[in-house]
Each structure stands twice: as C-alpha cells, then as structure tokens.
Image: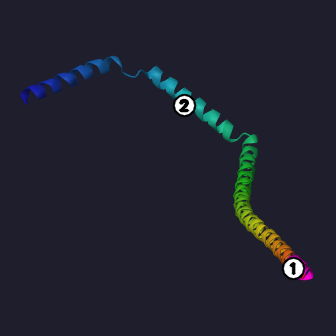
C-alpha cells in the first residue's frame, strides 16, 4: 500500500515536470483565437450564401421525387404480384381446359368406335339373315 502511494506520487511529479515543458504560450492562444475567428467568418459566409436556399429547396424536391418513386415501386410490386397470381390461375385453367379437351376427344373417339361396332354388328346381322 505504501509502495503504491509512492509510485502514484512519482507519477504525479513526473507529469507535473513534463507539463511544465508543454505550457500554452500567449502566441498559441492568439493563433487559436484568429483561427476560430476565421472559421466563424467562413461558416457565416457559407450560411448566408445565396445558393444555400436553392440547394435546400433542390434537396426537398429530390426527396419528394424519391418518395414518389418509392410509392410507384410499391404499387408496381403489388401489380406484379397480382399478375403472377392471375398467371398462375390462367395456367391452372389452361391445364383443366386441356384435360377437358382430351376427355372430349376421347369421348368422341369412343362414340365413333361404338358406332363403328354397331354398324359392323348390323352388317354381320344383315349378311347373316340375307343369306338364309
């Protein structure tokens, strides 16, 4: 504990000795004041520049355009999603239509086949009874 206190005292004294070499000179203070005054003047000049208001106005206009574009993108996305849903529905309808058309063609084919068999049977009957 005593050693820690001695070390801390030595550190403080070494800092005090080194800080005496780094003291602020009056010339440094004057330079800092002049630099601060110049920066304040530059800031005021930029804030009163006539183009400043136009730039702020342009930024507002561009922000509104961005909002409109974002809104249009959102609307377009909704329309695209709806079109995809309708396209999926149309594909399903097309598939059902194809199946129904296939069934209809098959029914027509079967009907023609039945008619052919019937006519063949009639021909056989006719030939059978006509030769007796």
Mark with earlier residue (1, 2): 2
Q: Name the element at disc 2.
A: helix
Residue 124, how many percent across, how many down? Answer: 86, 76
How far across and how far down the image is residue 37, in percent?
57, 31
Q: Is residue 128 magenta?
A: yes
Residue 21 in percent (x, y) is at 33, 16
* 28 lies left or right of 63: left
The residue beneath circle 1 is 128
The residue sitting at 87% across, 79% down in the picture is 128
Is residue 42 positioned above or below 85 on the image?
above
Q: Is residue 115 left or right of residue 53?
A: right
Magenta highlight on residue 73 = no
Residue at the disc numbered 2: 36
Pick the residue in front: 82 or 120: 120
Q: Residue furthest front?
A: 132
What predominant SS class does the magenta segment belong to? Answer: helix
The secondary element bearing badge 1 is classed as helix
Point out which mark residue 48 bears.
Answer: none
Dividing the image into 4 quarters, which one contains the N terminus? top left
- In the image, residue 119 sits, relative to residue 37, either above or below, namely below
Residue in the image at 52% along x and 29% along y: 33
Q: Which residues are magenta?
A: 123-131
State which mark lies toward you, 1 or 2. 1
Of the pair 98 and 24, the residue shown nearer to us: 98
Q: Is residue 84 above or below residue 10?
A: below
Q: Residues within 10 Å of mark 1 (few under 14, many from 20)?
A: few
Pick the quarter of the image with the C terminus: bottom right
Q: CA distance from mark 1 to mark 2?
A: 128 Å
């Amino acid at each position: 504990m005593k050693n820690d206190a001695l070390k801390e005292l030595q550190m403080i004294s070494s800092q005090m000795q080194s800080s005496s070499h780094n003291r602020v000179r009056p010339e440094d203070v004057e330079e800092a004041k002049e630099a601060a005054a110049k920066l304040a003047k530059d800031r005021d000049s930029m804030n009163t520049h006539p183009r400043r208001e136009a730039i702020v106005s342009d930024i507002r206009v561009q922000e509104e355009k961005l909002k409109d574009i974002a809104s249009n993108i959102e609307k377009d996305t909704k329309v695209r999603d709806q079109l995809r849903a309708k396209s999926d529905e149309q594909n399903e309808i097309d598939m059902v239509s194809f199946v129904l058309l296939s069934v209809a063609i098959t029914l027509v084919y079967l009907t023609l086949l039945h008619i052919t068999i019937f006519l063949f049977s009639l021909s056989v009957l006719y030939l059978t009874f006509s030769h007796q």
